[in-house]
Amino acid sequence: MKKTFEPIVFKDLDEWEEDLLRRYPDPDSIAEGKSTEAFRNYDSPERDSVREFYRLNHTYQTYDFVLNKRATFLAFDKKEMPIWEAYDFLNQLVDDSDPDTDLDQLQHLLQTAEAIRKDGHPDWMVLVGLLHDMGKVLCLFGEPQWAVVGDTFPVGCAHSDKIVYPEFFKQNPDSENPAYNTKYGVYSQNCGLRNVQMSWGHDEYVYHMVKDYVPESGLYMLRYHSFYAQHRENAYDHLLDDHDREMFKWVKLFNPYDLYSKNPNPPDWKALRPYYEDLVAKYLPPTLKF
């Protein structure tokens, strides 16, 4: 059932939006134990598993592949379970695409959510911190990590050289297809991201899973938090419309919490659990469809 947000949620949003969006979090206040320059370092030391991950990802994430995965998984007919059961599974997963952490996924999600809560953001944004990688449960259905995690990018148009390891796109058949290898490909100038197919993975999956329960600003955070080529490099401005540009302020607000909250110290889940159980119950139904 589609959730109807109480007016107070959006009233609170209006009250703090103007002030907070004039500034983004100071990454150095979020990062613990290392400088911000040390994050997303794919070269020193180079991790063969990360490089191989992106070779596979960039080779096989084609336009047709994405359409097939959307048809397969966005029916949400695989399983229905409480969110906490999904997190039990995520505890078994370490993200091969991430050079910054070896912690399990729930610990990373809690670190992100707690950093957001510490800075006094509204509770729906704390929830986004807790949810943003939940789509990685796709691995539960036998999906390889290269089809679940990693940086996302548009398919159906030319690949930007601002994407990590762009040299691997030479092996992607779309790079030789004149329908897909031009600047706009199957799209048009400033068509809006709602009309753009992104590489398949956990961002798109979790967005569709909770799109009836989270404010639009939070949905942009979920859907595009791995779209580094845009929110860090502005590589796809030619596809964004004015609404996307406005909403990407929220993506940029969220991104430092996702990235710089990673540290080797696991959160105290026993102490935090009552707060997060109440938060989840406030916004989400007892079970979610996967």
Image (cartoon, rainbow, N blue to C red):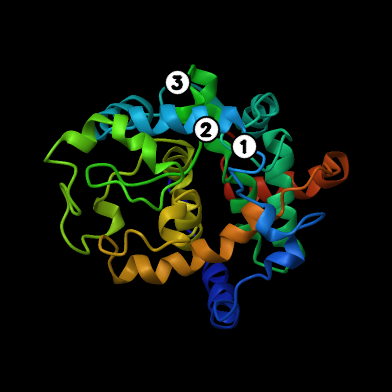
Using a 10 Å C-alpha cutoff, classify the residue at mark 3 as few (fewer than 14 neighbours), some (14 to 19) or many (20 or more). Answer: few
> Please, what is the three-letter code of the amino acid marked with disc 3?
Lys
Instruction: State how many labels appear.
Output: 3
Residue 184 seen in this snapshot: yes
> Please, what is the three-letter code of the amino acid marked with disc 1?
Glu
Left or right, 253 with reference to 201:
right
Q: Are marks 1 and 2 in contact (CB under 8 Å)?
A: yes
- Disc number for residue 51: 2
Q: For mark 2, give the secondary structure.
A: helix
- Disc number for residue 46: 1
- Residue 80: give x, y in percent of width and height: 52, 25
State whether residue 1 is above or below residue 53: below
Q: Nearer the viewer, residue 240 or 2?
A: 240
Using a 10 Å C-alpha cutoff, classify the residue at mark 1 as few (fewer than 14 neighbours), some (14 to 19) or many (20 or more). Answer: few
Residue drawn where x is 58% and y is 27% of the image:
49
> Which residue lies under the disc numbered 3?
78
> In the picture, residue 36 is in which quadrant?
bottom right
Please state which of the two labelled residues, at mark 2 or mark 3, is closer to the viewer.
2
Please state which of the two labelled residues, at mark 3 or mark 1, is closer to the viewer.
1
Q: CA distance from mark 3 to mark 1?
A: 37 Å
Left or right, 86 with reference to 58:
right
- Residue 254: give x, y in percent of width and height: 58, 60
- Disc number for residue 278: none
Q: CA distance from mark 1 to mark 2?
A: 8 Å
> Please, what is the three-letter code of the amino acid marked with disc 2?
Arg
Q: CA distance from mark 2 to mark 3?
A: 31 Å
